[in-house]
Image (cartoon, grey):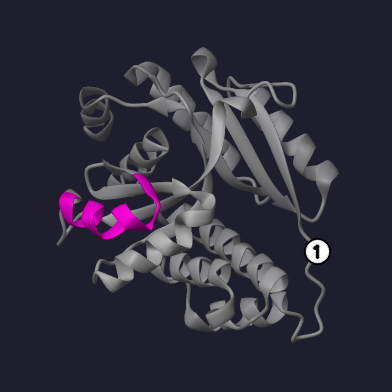
Amino acid sequence: MSGHSKWATTKHKKAVIDARRAKSFAKLIKNIEVAAKMGGADLSGNPTLVDAVQKAKKTSVPNDNIDRAIKRGAGLTGESIEYTTIMYEGYGPNGVALLIECLTDNKNRAAAEVRTLMSRNGGTMADPGSVAYNFARKGVIVVPAEGTTEDDVLAAVLDAGAEEVTDEGETFEVITEASDMVAARTALQEAGIDYDSADAAFVPNLKVEIDAETARKVFRLIDALEDSDDVQNIYSNFDLSAEVQAELEAE
């Protein structure tokens, strides 16, 4: 995940924001709808919904939009929410591994779009299982670095199932087993430490460092995929050295 986090940070620093804001909101709303459908509208009994709402609020999704999404997902408005999760596997430039998670109401459209975007941007599709075995389902909690230290975060989550805490520059990442994520998130809150997001994600077992030229190509591919309404999350195994990240941020 560190590579993905550094990519997201680089994008943020370059202020590529407005054109993607509506799409980002739509994807966060989808997460809320699905969480509400699976576990109901009561936040106190639905930790997945809590995390989906927290992430939306941190991204400035209006409260009215969030409330409507909860009601829609929970079936309180009479609307039918039917999304299917599909995972596609592939490779980006220089063999960078990609897991492309779609949340869609049209599987055929999603499949065609992912294949087209991959082929147009230097990626190739892979057979099911050929990439996924390199990843493990984990809980990933992102904590803003401002106002806290790595030691503070580690002390808070160590007894709550955290496997590791990594310094990603502007944030710390807490990695847990997926089943321990809620406990670790709760431990942070009890310690008075704010967090930006808590997600079940696919974390690479082995990361591959890439150079700046490869990173630009990989980012271009990921950006193109993220523009698809059906693509919800993208996981990769690339990592960036401090020198490569600095070079990219200077552009």
Q: Please state which of residues 136 and 14 is positioned toward the viewer in this rendering.
A: 136
Q: Quadrant of residue 242?
A: top left
Residue ID at (61%, 21%): 123
Q: Main secondary structure of the magenta part?
A: helix
Q: Residue furthest top?
A: 94
- The range drawn in magenta is 151-163
Residue marked by disc 1:
82
Residue 251 on image: x %, y %? 26, 31
Based on the picture, tell me whether residue 155 belongs to the magenta stretch. yes
Label 1 crowding class (10 Å Cα cut-off): few <14, some 14-19, many 20+?
few
| The N terminus: image quadrant | top left
Query: For the image shown, how many numbered marks are present on the structure?
Result: 1
Residue in front for this viewpoint, 7 or 236: 236
Q: Compared with residue 198, is residue 76 higher up or lower down, i.e. above or below?
A: below
Q: Quadrant of residue 42?
A: bottom right
Q: Residue 166 location, x and y as percent?
A: 28, 41
111, above or below 59, in the image:
above
Say what amino acid the circle numbered 1 marks. Glu
How far across and how far down the image is residue 180, in percent? 47, 56
Identify the residue at image location x=73%, y=29%: 115
Question: Residue 223 colored magenta?
Answer: no
Tag 1's secondary structure? Answer: loop
Q: Is residue 16 visible?
A: no
Closer to the camera, 150 or 12? 150
In this view, the residue in front, 103 or 251, is 103
